[in-house]
Image (cartoon, rainbow, N blue to C red):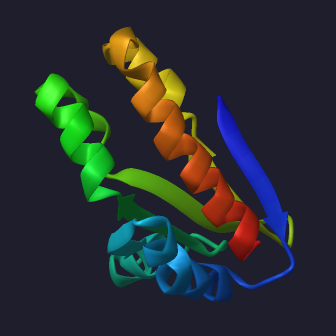
Amino acid sequence: MQYVEVSNKSVQEVVDSIKEISSKYKFGVQHVHNVKETLKSKGIDLGNECQIVDICNPIIAQKLLSEDMSLSIIMPCKISVYTQHGETMIAMNSLVQLVDDINPDLIEIAQEAQELLLEIIDEVK
């Protein structure tokens, strides 16, 4: 499952807002992948804007990884901000579903993180 919200802001405005407010939710932005620019540097025109924000809450990461290091394959969490049909979209995969696929015993921790991520998305849209 994925969560998708439409924003009236530009992709860059949304990404900048995520960077600005993430610490309020105890998350940090680790990296922003500008997919359009990366592809452009390889001679490929994507057409749409697309930036992927790697975001992590170290306390939640420690809780998950101390129980199951294999969860590292789904970290850090990603929020994708892109344009489609002239609209700015903000999307993320269900962290609960991803964790459930690997270790169902840790769904409560995943739910805690997912709720915070959805609050971030709601605030920046």
With 66 as the anchor, is 51 left or right in this view? right
In which quadrant is the N terminus drawn? top right
In which quadrant is the C terminus drawn? bottom right
Above or below — where is 66 with respect to 81?
above
Above or below — where is 73 with respect to 80?
above
The quarter of the picture where residue 29 lies is bottom left
Can residue 77 be seen here? The reply is yes
- Percent x, y for residue 60? 32, 45
- Percent x, y for residue 57? 34, 57
Please name the residue shown 56% across and 53% down the image: 116
- Percent x, y for residue 40? 43, 81
| Foreground pick, 115 / 6 | 115
- Percent x, y for residue 111? 53, 33
| Foreground pick, 76 / 60 | 60
With 102 as the anchor, is 18 left or right in this view? right
Can residue 44 be seen here? The reply is no
Please name the residue shown 83% across and 63% down the image: 6
All told, the count of numbered labels is 0
Please name the residue shown 40% across and 50% down the image: 77
The quarter of the picture where residue 5 lies is bottom right
| Foreground pick, 58 / 95 | 58
